Amino acid sequence: MRFLVVLSLFAVYGHAEWWGFRGPGGNGVSELKTLPVEWSESKNVAWKTAIPGKGHSSPIIVGKRVCLTTSVEGESIPGKKAVKHLLGGEVFVHPQTASEDKKVALHALCVDAETGKILWNQKVYDGDVYDGRHQFNTFASPTPITDGKGVFFYFESQGLYAFDLNGKALWKLSIGGVAKLGLAAGTSPVLAGGVIVLQADEDNGEKSFLYGVSPKNGEIAWKVKRDVSATFNTPVVVKNGNADVVVTAATEHVIAYDPATGKELWRGPGIGGYAAASPVSGLGMVFPNSYHPVKKLMAMRVDPKAGERVVWQYEKGTAYVPSPILYEGNLYLMADSGMMSCLDARTGKVIYEGKRVPKPGRFTASPVAFDGKLLLTNQDGETYVVRAGAEHEVIGTNSIGEPVYASLALDGDSIYIRGAANLYRIRRP
């Protein structure tokens, strides 16, 4: 059965491993049945490895390696100031920006999945940063991507770096500075149409671009201008027949591209608010969403030949950071507080709204799903196991005892959790 599942996933996504942000298709869903549902600081922990510095990038798994990024902030640089930001034509300084004057070292790491030993830790950048970061963000928040041969680590203004699985540097690429309102990057790269797609949208959109980069040598295959303001979410790669379609969600427009050429395939209405939570896809549709200053989620047809683009719209329950999840025909929305709503993904019909987890908390990790269950992980490191379906039921609570901001990764028989200080492999004995 496992062999058939792997073949099925390979046919749809090209691989069955957790190779990028939110795994196969970028949707947070695994077909695996062998994952643990109970753990604690000591129970079902196969290993725990300290990760230096700070980072909100999620772990990815390729073969027997777990890869992620981290940042180590150093001393202040006298006289260093961040790039000037414009918002609505006026100079803007975000009240929660930080570290714009710091020296920062950025690292790409790979850990042995069997033992937890750090196999290699490459410092890819050491110097000043182009822009500051939100006080709760890090300079290592984008999740890496892999094609099974190379691993690609993205730090936006500070570059894109390629390594082989043994830690040998292959190439690096700079796309220049990308102003982010003093909040730092959140967008992860995706692989589609034979290229690495980078979504690099800045402040008011004057220098917003989408890039297609060759994974073989780091050369820019195409670059297209985008008339959208700063985004922090990750594009979603959707299949339309046998072809990849990359869908990006921004305040002004939702736009679909052909990743082979960068050609715009279609555009629809924008999400209206900040573009932080990433879209998900399924059933021939994509579901972009926003939280502030308006709550908005749309179901949009992916097919470029479709007539009406928007199938339905919902204006409650969305989150600022966590992305929704589509699982077994239902679309689950989780607010930053953990409050959940469930909709029929085909019609938008409400199945339930406003269901709570046992204890109030804050969530930045996006939900993941497997074997009829949803995993919701809060910033305190507690993961709630919620039964999928028409009835909201919390069937378990697990904690690793330290904060968690990154989304979980699922692979084989294990769950990988990136805590504030440690990387964990959770595995049933």
Image (cartoon, rainbow, N blue to C red):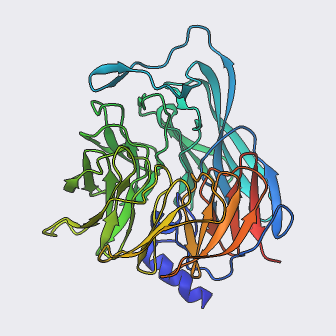
Q: Which residue is at a point 27% across and 26% down the rendered structure image?
A: 88
Residue 208: x %, y % from top left: 31, 36
The answer, for residue 133, to whether it is visible in the render is yes
Q: Quadrant of the N terminus?
A: bottom right
Q: Quadrant of the C terminus?
A: bottom right
Residue 89: x %, y % from top left: 26, 22
Q: Which residue is at a point 44% across and 55% down the rendered structure image?
A: 190
User: Camera-side residue: 76 or 312?
Assistant: 312
**Looking at the rendering, which quadrant does residue 260 occupy?**
bottom left
Left or right, 427 with respect to 317, comes to: right
The answer, for residue 298, to whether it is visible in the render is no
User: Camera-side residue: 386 or 204?
Assistant: 386
Q: Which residue is at a point 47% across and 28% down the rendered structure image?
A: 182
Residue 169: x %, y % from top left: 61, 43
Residue 144: x %, y % from top left: 55, 51
**Looking at the rendering, which quadrant does residue 292 occupy?**
top left
Which residue is the extreme one toward the top? 79
Left or right, 49 with respect to 271, comes to: right
